[in-house]
Image: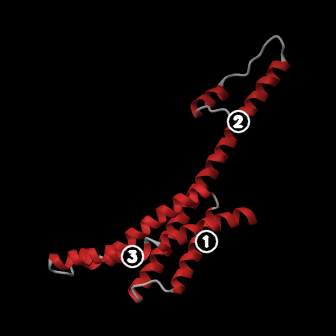
């Protein structure tokens, strides 16, 4: 059992002098055991918090890598051919499968996939509309046309099929990792 005490309560508990009574050693021994148990539970809670923090950091790092790789593959395809070819599909599915296998937890995979996908959409849109943002295009009509073109291209490229297939691949990756390991 873990005690949910604050650090100040724990420190004040340890600073109290040990109880001496007419019973002598028995009560003293019980008091020492109680303090050792309290120290053990506090150390256990600290270790669990550090592990939990490390796991969350790992999930965040996987999500950022997922976003970066997804954006890079799609931007490469869009700058090259304006469509995703079979090799790009294989790369996208492999990235999603691997990310799902690294994360394992289904809830975190779902949240991480949609977070990575939305961030990828944002990165891809920003990269496609960069000339308009930097002021390379002088006329407002050209800027608006580029923004509209970027939105349409991103929506046509990523929304119907890649969204479903990559989501399924990430769930399959998590499922396979959970079953095989």
The quarter holding residue 58 reads bottom right
In the image, 181 versus 141, the foreground residue is 141
Residue 105, position as x, y percentages in the image: 63, 57
Residue at 48 percent of width and 80 percent of height: 73
Question: Which mark's residue is nearer the viewer, 3 or 2?
Answer: 3
Considering only order in the chain, which callout, 2 or 1, is on the residue closer to the N terminus? 2
Instruction: Name the residue tied to disc 1.
Output: 97
Q: Where is residue 49 in the image (x, y as percent from the top left)?
A: 62, 47
Q: What colour-coding does the image apply?
A: secondary structure
Q: In this view, does 81 lie to the left or right of 169?
A: left
Return the disc, 3 or 2, that comes first in the chain's sequence. Answer: 2
**Which residue carries the number 3 mark?**
156
Q: Which mark is residue 150?
A: none
Q: Mark 2 points at which residue?
A: 39
Q: In this view, does 134 lie above or below 51?
A: below
The image shows residue 42, relative to residue 179, as above or below, that is above
Q: Position of residue 91 (x, y in %)?
A: 55, 80
Asked if the residue under mark 1 is in contact with the one under mark 3, i.e. CB atoms within 8 Å, the reply is: no
Label pair 3/2, CB-CB below 8 angstroms: no
The image quadrant that residue 13 belongs to is top right
Closer mark to the observer between disc 1 and disc 2: 1
From what the image shows, is residue 138 above or below residue 61?
below
Q: How far apart are marks 3 and 1 (CA)?
A: 23 Å
């Amino acid at each position: 059992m873990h005690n949910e005490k604050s650090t100040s309560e724990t420190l004040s508990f340890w600073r109290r002098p040990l109880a001496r009574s007419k019973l002598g050693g028995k009560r003293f021994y019980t008091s020492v055991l109680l303090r050792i148990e309290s120290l053990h539970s506090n150390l256990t809670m600290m270790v669990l918090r550090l592990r939990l923090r490390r796991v969350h950091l790992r999930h965040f790092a996987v999500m950022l890598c997922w976003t970066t790789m997804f954006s890079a593959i799609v931007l490469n395809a869009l700058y090259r051919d304006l469509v995703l070819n079979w090799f790009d599909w294989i790369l996208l599915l492999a990235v999603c499968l691997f990310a799902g296998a690294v994360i394992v937890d289904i809830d975190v995979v779902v949240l991480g996939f949609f977070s990575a996908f939305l961030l990828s959409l944002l990165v891809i849109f920003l990269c496609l509309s960069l000339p308009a943002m930097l002021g390379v295009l002088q006329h407002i009509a050209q800027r608006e046309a580029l923004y509209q073109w970027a939105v349409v291209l991103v929506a046509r490229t990523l929304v119907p099929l890649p969204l479903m297939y990559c989501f399924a691949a990430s769930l399959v990756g998590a499922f396979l990792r959970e079953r095989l390991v």
